[in-house]
Amino acid sequence: MIKGYTPNYKEVADNIGTAAYIFDADVLRDRLIMLKETLGQEIDICYAMKANPFIVKEAENHVDRYEVCSHGEFRICEKANIPMEKIVLSGVYKEAEDTKRIIDTYRDKILYTSESVNQFHLINERAEENGIVVDMILRITTGNQFGMNEEELCSIIADRSKFKGVNIVGIQHFSGTQRKNLKIYKEELDYCDDLIDKLYKEYGYKAEELEFGTGFFFDYFQPNSKKEVVDKVNGEANSRALDVELVKEFRKLLDEMRFKGKISLEIGRFIAAPCGRYYTSIVDKKFNGNIHFAIVDGGIHQLNYFGQMMGMKLPWYRQLKPNGEVYVDGDTIVNVSGSLCTINDNIVKQMPLTNPEIKDILEFRNAGAYSMTETPALFLSRDLPKVYIFDKENGLRLVRDRYEAFELNF
Ligand SMILES: Cc1ncc(COP(=O)(O)O)c(C=O)c1O
């Protein structure tokens, strides 16, 4: 596991600034190499770019595909010159005009998903109008608004020869994020096997591929220090070692499948989370009702740890002090609150810090997934943080400057 770029106080205070994200491309690539090696080269990795669109280019040589779920995400891929052959155009709502533009422009280079009967017809008709045949996978629902039900999916398969614009290559399945229960994985893969068998037996349709969203669990937090002795030096690395175990166990389940065609795994959080660090400065402190508060220039509109319950869990962090000292622990128990007008803006409650002072900088680790995209970023019209990409070869690059959000709110 690559340790990643760990700037000191001076670098953050003088050059980087807060609030800011740094995405470490070496850590990202190391992670993707680990995934490929553990899964086997024959399993395709499809990066669900919703987790972090800033790193699409850095991931390019190590992912087989990108799962693109909106026209905005598609525009990012265009801007980044991602090869269209790597794109899976997905999404529960595919705007008709945008989808038509994409089909007209990129024709049969892209793999399309269909999440509904209407989407299926939209894509098929436009492809027919263009006189082309596009590859498509049909998303089966897991009981929510995504995908289509089995009856609809089967009826499309039954009638497939009527649709001249699409070549149905297989099915797509995704049920949710932060999952590590192998029994549930097994049930879902069995279900996919059964569905694929049924399509063959009843309709003579042979699926060539399965695109499966794993929703792999990512452990963001330190063990509960009351119960367990927390190894502050190796603890985070131990969590990452467990990640490899999860992928290994999952791989065994793929081997047990009857389906022997191509498998592509859609993965977002598990790929992107460890490459990101978020920096925020303490800008005020107070003692209200016996609670020691440190107010920071960031907040929960910029940092998102899935499973964080009202700030009750402790992520991995470093406290950087102006004199160069660095702490990962301390005797002063502080609520670290952000700068939003809501009592919910607590990044961490009861965080152990060392003599916390205004100007101290807090580095929150594993902030590479969903923080930039899934948080209430525009609340209070606060500026969007700077975004940097780092790798050893090119150093630190600013890829988005601080952005004045008020422009978007008025
Ligand atoms: C269809 C689909 N695939 C993959 C993902 C990525 O999930 P995760 O970030 O848990 O890997 C999502 C997340 O919402 C999704 O909707």
Image (tube, helix red, strand yellow):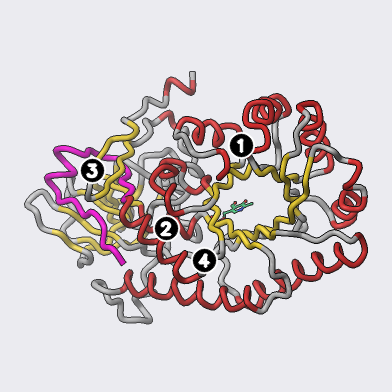
Q: Secondary structure at mark 3?
A: loop
**104 above or below 70?**
above
Q: Disc 4 marks which amino acid?
A: Phe
Q: Quadrant of the N terminus?
A: bottom left
- The label nearer to you, 1 versus 4, is 1
Indicate which disc, 1 or 3, sits on the residue closer to the N terminus: 1
Q: Secondary structure at mark 2?
A: loop
How far apart are the two marked residues, 4 and 2, measured between alpha carbons?
19 Å
In depth, the one of 153 and 339 nearer the eye is 153
How far apart are the two marked residues, 2 and 1, measured between alpha carbons?
31 Å
Q: Disc 1 marks which amino acid?
A: Ser
Give the labeled residue for mark 3.
394
In depth, the one of 22 and 392 nearer the eye is 392
Indicate which disc, 4 or 2, sits on the residue closer to the N terminus: 4
Say left or right for 216 vs 6.
Answer: right
How far apart are the two marked residues, 1 and 4, measured between alpha carbons?
24 Å
- The label nearer to you, 2 versus 1, is 1
Tell me the number on the disc at residue 217. 4
Specify whether tag 2 is near ligand 1 (CB below 8 Å).
no
Give the labeled residue for mark 1.
70
Give the quarter of the image for residue 102: top right
Residue 5: say if magenta: yes
How far apart are the two marked residues, 1 and 3, measured between alpha carbons?
31 Å
Image x and y of residue 44, in percent: 56, 59
